Amino acid sequence: MRKIWPRLPFSSRLTMGFLLAIFAPQASAAPDPGGAVSAPGTTGMELIAFEAPGCAYCPIFRRDVAPSYGASRAGKAAPLRFMDLNDGAADRFKLSSPITVVPTLVLVRDGVEIGRIAGYVGPANVYHILNTMLPPE
């Protein structure tokens, strides 16, 4: 998997981290980064939230979407798992294209991508897009 984030110069990453610490809303009660937020589903589907250090919208996604995800239709069909884009375990998924924006939500079935949402688009849009990717009830 091609990783874009580490190619930024150290000074750029440092500046972005500094700005994030000052201006980003604080995340509250964030789930374990490597763990699932909802119980495993029987569909073989999973929603992987790819994140990277210094991402400005990742804590906002965790704050706005993650707490309510498990009770949603999507949460019942595909449990949510957070994964660092630079983690070697991320390479085990068969993605249709490289991830260039974080956070990116990738809906996978048995490790193969079936849909994605690149970037954070707000809670209502996340659920709407996920509902269009899921099979009908």
Image: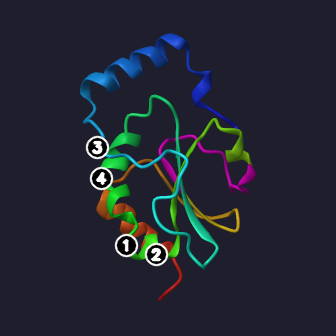
Secondary structure mostly seen in the magenta stretch: loop
Residue at 57% from the left image edge and 29% from the top image edge: 5
The residue to which callout 4 is attached is 64
Image quarter in which the N terminus is found: top right
Gap in angstroms between the C-alphas marked 2 and 4:
18 Å
Question: Residue sitting at 56 percent across and 70 percent down?
Answer: 40
- Callout 1: helix, strand or loop? loop
Q: Disc 3 marks which residue? A: 28
Pointer 2: what residue? 76
Label 1 or label 3, whichever lies nearer to me, is 3
The vertical placement of 62 against 7, above or below, is: below
| Of marks 4 and 3, the one in the foreground | 3
- What secondary structure is marked by label 2? helix
Q: Which residue is mark 1?
A: 72
Measure the alpha-carbon separation of dots 1 and 4.
13 Å
* Towards the viewer: 136 or 40: 40
The stretch in magenta equals: 92-105
- List x then y, in percent, for residue 12: 47, 16
Is 135 placed above or below 50 here? below
Q: Residue at x 44, y 47 (%)?
A: 119
The answer to which of marks 3 and 2 sits earlier in the sequence is: 3
Q: Which mark is residue 31?
A: none
In the image, is residue 32 part of the stretch drawn in magenta? no
* Residue 39: % across, % down: 50, 69
Kind of residue at disc 2: Lys
| Of callouts 1 and 4, the N-terminal one | 4
Kind of residue at disc 3: Ser
Amino acid type indicated by mark 4: Asp
Mark closer to the chain start, 2 or 4 = 4
Tell me whether circle 1 and circle 3 mark residues in contact (CB < 8 Å).
no
Label 4 element class: helix
